[in-house]
Structure formats: structure tokens, C-alpha cells
Image (tube, helix red, strand yellow):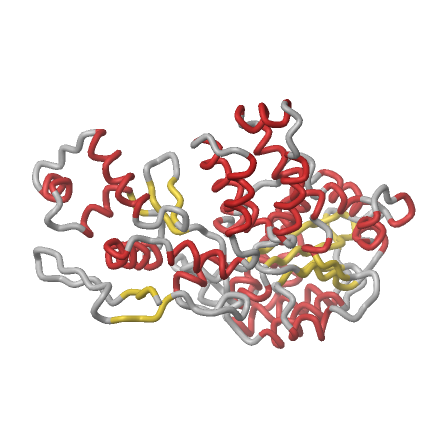
Amino acid sequence: MRARQDAVAETYADTYEWIFKSRNNAGRDEAVQVGFLDWLRSGDGIFWISGKAGSGKSTLMKFLCGHRQTSTVLEEWAGDAKVVIVEHFFWLADQTSQHTFHGLLRHLLFDVFKQCPDLMPIVCKEIWDIPKGPDDDTESWTLPALRGTLRRLQSQRLSHAGRGVRLCYFIDGLDECKGEHRELLDIIRTLADCPDIKICVYSRPWNTFANALGREPGKTLTLQDLTRQDIYTYVEGHLIQDEHFAHMVSQGTSCNEFIVEVTQKAQGVFLWVYLVVKLLLRGLDNGDSLDDLQRRLRRLPPDLVDYFRQMFDTLDESYEEQTAQTFLVCLAAREPLPLLGFAALEPRDVLAQRIRGDGHVKLADVHSLQAQLKKKGQRPLSRSDRSECRVSSHRNEQDLLRGVPASDGPWLFTLDRDLATATEPSGQQFPPGPRFV
């Protein structure tokens, strides 16, 4: 259940701290507009945090759920009652149930029962009373059974160990739920009708969510409108660590204006900033001057979808077929793949033959394979310290690789049954993959 949460990036330095500023003592203009802390302390119902693709919604939720101040303020709201905080990350790329109604309801109930086991025989009475055999597992937990249990949780006055119970749910990625979004919203609103339950939800600003959640003053937040200073901090912090850039700063060049330019062009999208800063740091490794960096920056489109398209447009045509195969394998994998597994995409390669032979692989072989993957599209791929290679877990990047329109933008791939087909010596073919368009 924690796969998506563990994959979400941590916050950088002091970013997102503005979320805990109260309306009454806000130290910056953006904080005056937020009011999240006031809702957390004394509000009710649903607080909706919306944001463009890549704006950092999941990172903000991970930050809030793990921050001590969140639990401290919720304890003020709960009074003498016990506070139970439950978080759920929808994840469309997940191969299990993390993107389904069934997975959501199971998770919402599991975390409550884990923290308040006394509630199980009360809230789960119908299932609790059914005689169980030694081989029984979760078969009784059908979707109707889960809905009924959640309704009882919502309708009863809850207590645990002699104390009342108040619940705060954090649910990320409503737009990643594989199901009817209206039905999802009905579940959330029904839960939030209970005075002992409040819910903070995160999603892209789609009309379905805006119409249902965006009309209550003081209970909404548009993330990309509030992260300008955070993005400036991120850009400055990473560039100033580079010795060459630090030297330019010491020489009095207009580096601050350049950081501001990057910040403005980002338009509140942290994923765009992350990619661009990596590109700028590579330029600094090559000895780029400030003018060089500005030319790099101004050639980049500010829109994330257009940025990805430009990345693929610059790929050498001779690598297109191999790159499409690599992406296809990554997207089909249920877990991160060993780096050496990609040697199978080149059946006549010396390394692939060695693996299929005696299995002895030299470190130089691994470095060679890393270099091959890098030249075939290393930016949408990420590699862990365990020599695993996987597609970035970010929804927007995976949408683009699958040929799904991201942010209602153009598709990067169309399916082609000829281009991305490879044959193993056994005669087994890889399934058709994406074709660059």
C-alpha cells in the first residue's frame, strides 16, 4: 500500500512551509490566501488542493502527512478524542488495486482498524460474525461489503479505549482513480458528512472536481499559484552548489535575474523545474557561461508536454526503434527491472550472449549498458543504486510514454505493430510498442 508514497519525492529545504501559516499571522501574501491551517484546526468537510500536472501535489501531501505540526493541530481539533490520520495515494500505474475503489476503501478501513482495533467488531459486525475457516482470507471483503462497513464507520459515534475517535483522511490523485469520478466523489462527500471526519483531497483541476469541490470559500488551494518562492529556492539551492555557477555569482554577474527567469518560466510546475535544473547543471559541467545558460533556457518550451516532445524530437533517429522497445519493456514491468535485463533487447550483442552463456559479466559491461540506455533516452528513465532501471514513477511521464494525452495535450506515441517488435533467439517476439510521431 505504500509503494506510491515511497516513490514520491521529498520536499526540498524549507519549501511548502507556507502551508502552515495562519490567515491571522501570515508572513507572505500567498499564505493569506491559503487558510489550510485554519481548516485543519477548526474546519470541517473537504479541503481540495488542486494543481497542474507536475506541480508537486503528491509531494505536498507526503510533506503534510509526515509533518509533526499536522498531527499537533489535528489534536487541537480533536480535543479529548483520539486522532487517526489516514493517507491514500491513488496510483494509476500500480499493478494491484491502488488505483481502484476497492483499493481505496480497503486502505481507508485498514489504517483506521490498525490504529483503533477496538472498532473492528463494531464497524465490521456483519463480517465479524461470519464463521471463518482456516483458509478464509479476504473473500468476504467485496465492494458492497466495504461500502457498508465504511457507512457504519461514518454513521456511528466512534470510541477507542474509552476515548472518542476523530478521523482525518488525506487522499491524493483523485484523477488517477480507475473508475467513475462522480462515484468517487459521492464516497468522499458521504464520509465528510460525519462531524468527526474531515478529508483533504488532491487532484488535477478537472471540471468534475472543480464543480464538486471548488465552490466552498476557504476550502480550496491552487498549488501552482503558491510555489513561486519554493521554486526559486530549489533553483538557487541547486545551482549555487555548482562551483562554476558560484564563481559567476561572486563575479557579480546577473545570476539572480537568471534564477528569476527560470522561476517565472516554470509556471509553478516543479517537474519542469527538476528537468531543467538537471539540464542546466550539465551545461555548467561543460563550462557554460551565463549567456550559454540563458540560451539553453530560452530554447526550452515552458509547457511540460511540449518539453517532453522536444526531448524525443532530439533523439537520434537510429535509436528510435531500440528506445521504443526499452520504454515498452519498462512500462510492462510489474517491478523495477535489473539493468542487465535490457541486454536481452539486443540478442546479438556480446553482453547479451555472455549473459545467456556462462553468466559472467564484467563491471565494464554494466557501464557499457548504462551508456547505451543513456543515449537512447535516459531522461524518462531513472536508475536506482541497485542497478535497476525503471520508468519514472511520475504520472505525467508515464502518460506520455503510454500514448495517453497528458493535461489534454498531444500524444507522443502511436502504437505501431512493426517498429517496436524484437525477436529473441527462441523465436518469441516482444509485443508491439510505441512509435515516435
Return the residue found at the far front: 291
- Asked if residue 407 is positioned above or below residue 59 in the image, the reply reads below
User: Is residue 116 something that shows in the picture?
Assistant: no
Q: Which one is in front, 435 or 389? A: 435
Q: Which one is in front, 170 or 265? A: 265
Q: Relative to 202, is 132 on the left or the right?
A: left
Q: Relative to 373, is 69 on the left or the right?
A: right
User: Is residue 117 something that shows in the picture?
Assistant: yes
- Which residue is painted at 57% across and 47% down in the image? 273
Q: How many labels were placed on the picture?
A: 0
- Which residue is painted at 64% across and 23% down in the image? 250
Q: Quadrant of residue 152?
A: bottom right
Residue 70: give x, y in percent of width and height: 74, 44
Residue 396: give x, y in percent of width and height: 50, 59
- Which residue is painted at 33% across and 53% down in the image? 315
Q: Relative to 350, is 85 on the left or the right?
A: right
In the picture, which quadrant includes the C terminus?
Answer: bottom left
Q: Which one is in front, 116 or 306? A: 306
Q: Quadrant of residue 193?
A: bottom right
Q: Relative to 38, is 148 on the left or the right?
A: left
Q: Quadrant of residue 73?
A: top right
Residue 387: give x, y in percent of width and height: 32, 37
- Asked if residue 291 is positioned above or below residue 330 in the image, the reply reads above
Return the residue found at the far right: 24
- Which residue is painted at 59% across and 55% down in the image? 88
